[in-house]
């Protein structure tokens, strides 16, 4: 019998809480080990950069409220944990009256849309290429794809992004430079708007897909080669099943499982890398918002976004871990 | 079987024996060679080129590379053989900039990866060899740590600690460089512990330290080298990521900082391709060299990948 055992679910939940706790603790402790008072440093920087510091008192107050800077460190820490656990990320420093939650909520759909589409596409294309490479009947043409896509794997996504931006937006003028949809369009479910969104997201998505495709292909190729040697493949062949049926139902069905686990690991890496891709393409997602935070020394905004990134990635990994035994009936995780 | 006997039973030349050594994998040698050249840039660069030109305002701004015709309407100046790769808008000379920045970017990766790998060796050995509660806590900690999105946390840290130099940046990046090595070494140690030669050593009363360093370490070397290489790669990736966000060292030019400057000055849309493309070419070369090394080391660690040779 497959499925989830109680122990396994509890273990995974514990792992999830541990990850979130570790991440939030690191972003609490390490900045405090740095010399100097962050609030003073920030106000000082704002003054030298000539920003608006009219409501400096309010800013300092917001900051002290969020982190309780007048308390001893351990009290600060528990307050911070409490605020994090209740998802109270407070106010932005640089755009003071705006709440961080609202700012993230506005940009989150764009990031999720871009990342989700890019991740799914690269997973499908990469695995298809990898599976075909391990298959004896595959045409020679496709065999050239692996070395090429593997070459891209070693290059970070934002560099591909810069090159794509230069060639396809600047030189050829096929795609827009920046933004998420053309100015003057009203967001809605009409063809013009959707077309514009796709056109704007194409290059950023391509740079992520090109980079992440290769590792899927490589992993899938290895798994398919292993699967190919199994007895049930020989039996399927001997039974006279069609090659297509063997390829899909016997080969891919078995080889794809470890790839799904790798999906979770890929998410974390992608969350970091896509920040830079969004910045290159001025794509108004969470990564770009984070960049705004950095440019304005908006510590609460930076910390709030990173907290949500940690939680988001951990949730995604948790969901994958919990669905995995359901996808693969052989795994029950009943052993302690 | 003597080492100098080949498959046909005839004695082959000394050279042929050396060539058959697994460490002389061409991918590994090429990758290492390229990286050594880049490290040497720091010492050889100043000998044949004036690296002081990497300072702001040391040459005329917006010069095109010498082989390109300048588009005066865009405000570019004619290139000169004195400044072969042109210059950017702050008056830094591109060739000097690349010569100065490349070894630095590589250095951050090497330091961070060394720290991460050493921590990984210690924790991995401790977990795999001593076992028990130590093993489970190290394993759980490294598993959880791996899921934390490193670059995001690094951004928080770096935005507080603005006065970064190469070493402190490497130190911070190393915080996220240890779980990978720890996991791999733990797994290898666990499987090795059950092998005959380790058990033999245990029975004959070798000390734990002896077993670790004399019996296990030599067999771990290819895995260690492969982990180290991929950690260098991910550390450089993290470092350039921070630099592109403007969070790296600000006083000394690095490749990521040059790209950050180019992006801020919208060099892509102004057509100043030489500003961002030379740093990118160098970074891509670094990543490719490291990638080649990883493949080469993988072939050394898994002889099956090399095809049957013996």
Image (cartoon, coloured by chain):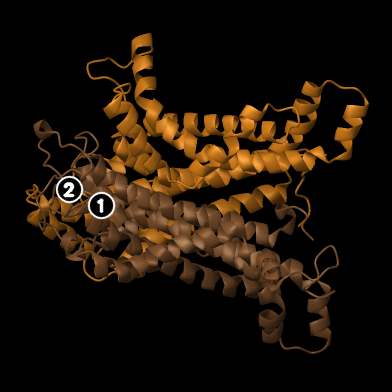
Chain colours: A orange, B brown
Look at the image and tell me in which quarter the N terminus of chain A lies: top right
Taking the image as shown, residue A161 lies to the left or right of residue A60, namely right
Taking the image as shown, residue A47 lies to the left or right of residue A290, namely left
The chain letter under disc 2 is B
Badge 1 crowding class, 10 Å Cα cut-off, few under 14, some 14 to 19, many 20 or more, is many
Q: Position of residue A61 (x, y in %)?
A: 18, 55
Q: Secondary structure at mark 2?
A: loop
Residue located 58% across and 62% down the image: B226
The chain letter under disc 1 is B
Q: Nearer the viewer, residue B117 or A83?
A: B117
Badge 2 crowding class, 10 Å Cα cut-off, few under 14, some 14 to 19, many 20 or more, is many
Question: What label sits on residue A186 in the rendered view?
Answer: none
Taking the image as shown, residue A202 lies to the left or right of residue B133, namely left
Q: Same chain for the residues at labels 2 and 1, yes or no?
A: yes
Q: Which residue is mark 1?
A: B258
| Residue A315 visible in image | no
| Residue B96 visible in image | yes
Q: Nearer the viewer, residue B181 or A4?
A: B181
Q: Are marks 2 and 1 in contact (CB under 8 Å)?
A: yes
Classify B199 as above or below A114: below
Question: What label sits on residue B88 in the rendered view?
Answer: 2
Q: CA distance from mark 2 to mark 1?
A: 9 Å
Classify B20 as above or below A130: below
Look at the image and tell me in which quarter the C terminus of chain A lies: bottom right
Q: Nearer the viewer, residue B234 or A187?
A: B234
């Amino acid at each position: 019998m497959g499925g989830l055992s109680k122990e396994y679910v509890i273990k995974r939940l514990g792992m999830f809480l541990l990850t979130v706790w570790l991440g939030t603790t690191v972003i609490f402790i390490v900045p405090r080990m740095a010399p100097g008072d962050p609030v003073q440093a920030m106000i000082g920087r704002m003054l030298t950069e000539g920003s608006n510091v009219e409501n400096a008192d309010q800013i300092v107050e917001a900051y002290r409220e969020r982190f309780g800077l007048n308390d001893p460190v351990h009290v600060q820490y528990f307050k911070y944990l409490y605020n994090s656990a209740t998802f109270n990320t407070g106010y932005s420093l640089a755009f003071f009256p705006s709440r961080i939650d609202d700012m993230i909520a506005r940009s989150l759909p764009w990031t999720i849309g871009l990342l989700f589409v890019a991740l799914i596409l690269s997973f499908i294309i990469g695995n298809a290429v990898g599976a075909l490479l391990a298959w004896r009947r595959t045409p020679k043409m496709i065999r050239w794809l692996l070395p090429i896509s593997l070459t891209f794997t070693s290059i970070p996504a934002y560099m591909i992004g810069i090159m794509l931006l230069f060639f396809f937006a600047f030189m050829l003028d096929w795609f827009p430079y920046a933004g998420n949809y053309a100015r003057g369009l009203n967001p809605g479910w009409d063809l013009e708007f959707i077309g514009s969104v796709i056109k704007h997201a194409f290059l950023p998505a391509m740079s992520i897909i090109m980079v992440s495709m290769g590792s899927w292909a490589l992993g899938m190729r290895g798994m398919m080669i292993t699967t190919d040697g199994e007895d049930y493949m020989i039996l399927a062949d001997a039974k006279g099943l069609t090659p297509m049926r063997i390829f899909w139902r016997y080969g891919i069905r078995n080889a794809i499982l470890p790839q799904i686990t790798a999906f979770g690991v890929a998410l974390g890496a992608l969350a970091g890398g896509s920040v830079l891709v969004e910045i290159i393409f001025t794509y108004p997602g969470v990564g770009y918002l984070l960049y705004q935070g950095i440019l304005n020394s908006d510590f609460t905004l930076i910390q709030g976004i990173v907290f949500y990134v940690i939680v988001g990635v951990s949730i995604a990994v948790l969901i994958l871990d919990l669905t995995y035994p359901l996808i693969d009936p052989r795994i029950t995780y009943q052993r302690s | 079987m003597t080492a100098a006997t080949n498959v046909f039973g005839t004695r082959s030349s000394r050279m042929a024996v050396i060539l058959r050594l697994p460490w002389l994998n061409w991918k590994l040698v090429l990758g290492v060679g390229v990286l050594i050249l880049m490290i040497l840039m720091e010492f050889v660069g100043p000998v044949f080129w004036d690296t002081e030109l990497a300072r702001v305002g040391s040459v005329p701004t917006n010069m095109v590379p010498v082989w390109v015709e300048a588009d005066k309407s865009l405000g570019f100046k004619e290139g000169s053989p004195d400044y072969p790769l042109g210059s950017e808008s702050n008056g830094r000379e591109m060739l000097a900039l690349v010569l100065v920045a490349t070894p630095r970017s590589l250095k951050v990766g090497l330091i961070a990866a060394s720290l991460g790998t050493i921590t990984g060796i210690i924790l991995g050995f401790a977990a795999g060899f001593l076992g028990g509660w130590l093993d489970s806590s190290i394993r759980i900690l490294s598993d959880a740590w791996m899921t934390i999105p490193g670059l995001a946390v690094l951004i928080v840290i770096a935005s507080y600690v603005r006065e970064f130099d190469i070493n402190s940046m490497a130190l911070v990046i190393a915080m996220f460089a240890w779980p990978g090595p720890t996991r791999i070494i733990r797994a290898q140690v666990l499987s090795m512990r059950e092998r005959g030669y380790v058990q033999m050593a245990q029975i004959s009363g070798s000390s734990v330290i002896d077993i670790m360093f004399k019996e296990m370490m030599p067999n771990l070397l290819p895995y260690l080298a492969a982990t180290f290489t991929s950690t260098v790669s991910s550390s450089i990736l993290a470092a350039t990521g921070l630099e592109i966000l403007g969070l790296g060292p600000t006083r000394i030019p690095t490749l990521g900082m040059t790209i950050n400057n180019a992006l801020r000055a919208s060099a892509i849309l102004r057509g100043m391709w030489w500003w961002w493309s030379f740093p990118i070419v160098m970074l891509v070369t670094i990543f490719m060299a490291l990638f080649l090394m990883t493949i080469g080391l993988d072939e050394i660690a898994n002889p099956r990948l090399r095809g049957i040779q013996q």
